[in-house]
Image (tube, grey):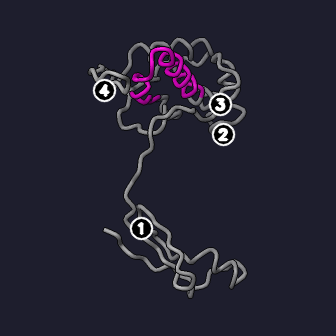
Amino acid sequence: MTDPGKNSQKVMIRIGFDEGLTARAERLLKALDLSEVAAKVTVNWNKRLRTTAGRAYSNLAKIELNPRLQLLPDEKRDHEINQTFLHELAHVVAHARNPKRRIQPHGDEWKQACADLGIPGEERCHSLNLGRTTRRKNFAYICPACEEVIYRVKRMNRSVACYSCCKNHNDGKYDNKFKLIEKRLV
């Protein structure tokens, strides 16, 4: 990857396991009396992350960060890496504190974990411009009545009818005469 700044010099970015952030995660988890989770936590830089800054696999105590965070301007880089790291670690903490309950990803338990990690009021989404992933649409589905077209990347696995036509002409219930017709685009 190259620096998106003025000059196009090569920038070395880390990929894979991050020993320093993993050790920091262990210390923070132990400070919150979560030693069992601290023993298995890992932090990795995953080059497959495209539009998200980070991701947590709470049940595995695994955190993945987008390496593009390392390419941010100097004045933002450390702050954004730290915020993303703590945001994802909060998911691990919230899950560890509530192992038998299904909790909302950014619910009260996560907000409490954020506060305990020193980032109270953390937002659910970031505002970083990491780019968008665009995927070619492989299928088009056409309504035989209104001719509305819906484009999809993946094939629909079941029969689907035009929502607007079913709503307007059949009280919102499925009607086979509005069944979408599949057309493969590639």
**On the image, numbered disc 4 is attached to which residue?**
2
Inter-mark Cα distance, 2 to 3? 17 Å
Inter-mark Cα distance, 4 to 2? 39 Å
Label 4, secondary structure: give it.
loop
Inter-mark Cα distance, 4 to 1? 36 Å
Q: Residue furthest front?
A: 6
Q: Viewer-nearest of labels 2 and 3? A: 3
Residue 186, placed above or below residue 4: below
Residue at 41%, 67% (x, y): give it.
155
Q: Amino acid at mark 2?
A: Ile
Q: Amino acid at mark 4?
A: Thr
Using the image, tell me which numbered label, if any, was put on residue 123. Answer: 3
Q: Which residues are magenta?
A: 63-90
Q: Viewer-nearest of labels 4 and 1? A: 4
Label 1, secondary structure: give it.
loop
Label whose residue precedes the other's in the sequence (4 or 2): 4
Residue 73 sits inside the magenta stretch:
yes
Q: Amino acid at mark 1?
A: Arg
**On the image, numbered disc 1 is attached to which residue?**
155
Answer whether labels 4 and 2 touch (C-beta < 8 Å): no
Label whose residue precedes the other's in the sequence (4 or 1): 4
Main SS, magenta residues? helix
Which of the 4 image quarters holds residue 83? top right
